[in-house]
Amino acid sequence: QELSCGEGVALVKPGTPAPTTPATDADRHAIEARTLEYLVKKDDGDFAAADAMFEDNVIAKFDRATWRNDRRVFNAAAGKPKARTIVAVTFYDDPADAPQLGRFAAADYRASFANQAAYCGYVIWLRQADGSYRLIREDETLLTDEIARKLTAEQIASLKKQPGCREPEGAQ
């Protein structure tokens, strides 16, 4: 068995390290506002503006034409939301399992529509070197009234436990 020693190469993650100071209420409010801005753009069918909120290298990985078409169909069926709530904002600084360094912010949201049984999801933002945030991930759960009528109460409860479908704090 041969063993050789030499200079090791340290793996350095790309990205801008998270600030040394913790996220503030102002940071949380900024993420809430940015998330609502993104969701309104989707509701209004302003998909080019919604896409522009993503990091360029992220948006290039997705079939946005199909996403836009699916969202148009959803918007036509659901109408405008009656209410939308940012349920939680959670900050993660330089997480070990992330592919890059940085301050990440996950915003969980819920909305109610006249023609939708359930709508919830989350978006993940990454702080940029200039202090702004760009989207790097989105996940949403949509449950139409038509589909909900075919499911049991247990199945609906299970769907509402999907990632991003957190209950507001204090809710049961």
Image: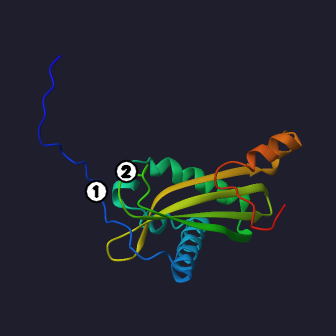
Looking at the figure, which quarter contains the C terminus?
Answer: bottom right
Q: Which residue is more in the foreground, 35 or 66?
A: 35
Q: For the point 59% across and 71% down, which residue is it?
A: 40
Q: For the point 60% across and 56% down, which residue is it?
A: 72
Q: Do the residues under discs 1 and 2 have CB atoms within 8 angstroms?
A: yes
Place of residue 106 in the rendered image (x, y in percent of width and height, measured from the top left): 55, 62
Which numbered disc covers residue 14?
1
Q: For the point 71% across and 58% down, which residue is it?
A: 166
- Residue 25 placement, left or right of 10: right
Q: Amino acid at mark 2?
A: Pro
For the image, the number of numbered tags is: 2
- Residue 16 placement, left or right of 165: left
Q: Amino acid at mark 1?
A: Pro
Which numbered disc covers residue 59?
none
Q: Secondary structure at mark 2?
A: loop
Q: Which residue is mark 2?
A: 99
Q: Which residue is more in the foreground, 138 or 19?
A: 19
Sequence-wise first label, 1 or 2: 1
- Residue 18 placement, left or right of 160: left
Q: Which residue is more in the foreground, 48 or 21?
A: 21
Q: Secondary structure at mark 1?
A: loop
Place of residue 103 in the rendered image (x, y in percent of width and height, measured from the top left): 43, 66
Q: In which quarter of the view is residue 18 placed?
A: bottom left
Looking at the figure, which quarter contains the N terminus?
Answer: top left
Q: CA distance from mark 1 to mark 2?
A: 8 Å
Q: Which residue is more in the foreground, 63 or 161?
A: 161
